Image (tube, grey):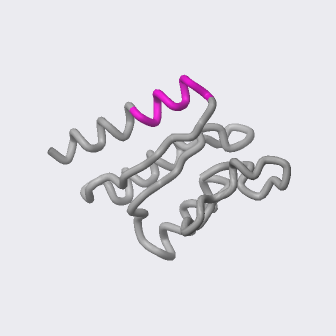
């Protein structure tokens, strides 16, 4: 998930091969509703405006929280955002036991 997923000037932000990319929380939600919860996520924190990966993760947890959290990578350059994602995912994993 990255707001620059289709930006021709930032190929490093494109979805990795074999991934389905989402540029926003709404796009990611639609993918999950269509395909089920992801097995692996590659996340950017800042998704443009007030949209962040945390909004998506909170939705994913409230919708599928009883299931094991997906594996993930955080490629965000926002250190606080990165820490928030990692902390959230660790808490989710811990809550499952």
Position in image of residue 58 (x %, y %): 44, 45
Location of residue 97 by image quarter: top left
Which is more toward the observer, 19 or 80? 19
Position in image of residue 65 (x %, y %): 31, 53
Query: Is residue 83 one of those drawn in magenta?
Result: yes
Q: Residue at x 29, y 36 (%)?
A: 91
Which is more toward the observer, 75 or 46? 75
In this view, the residue farthest toward the top is: 80
In this view, the residue farthest toward the right is: 9
Above or below for 64 versus 96: below
Q: Which residues are magenta?
A: 78-86
Total residue callouts:
0
User: In the figure, is residue 76 to the left or right of 64?
Assistant: right
Q: Main secondary structure of the magenta part?
A: helix
Q: Residue at x 59, y 36 (%)?
A: 76
Q: Residue at x 74, y 39 (%)?
A: 49
Above or below for 16 versus 47: below
């Amino acid at each position: 998930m990255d707001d620059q997923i289709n930006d021709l000037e930032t190929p490093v932000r494109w979805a990795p091969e074999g991934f389905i990319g989402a540029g926003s929380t709404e796009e990611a939600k639609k993918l999950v509703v269509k395909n089920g919860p992801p097995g692996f996520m590659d996340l950017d924190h800042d998704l443009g405006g007030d949209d962040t990966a945390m909004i998506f993760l909170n939705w994913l947890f409230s919708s599928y929280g009883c299931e094991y959290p997906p594996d993930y990578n955080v490629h965000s350059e926002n250190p606080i955002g990165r820490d928030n994602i990692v902390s959230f995912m660790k808490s989710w994993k811990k809550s499952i036991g």
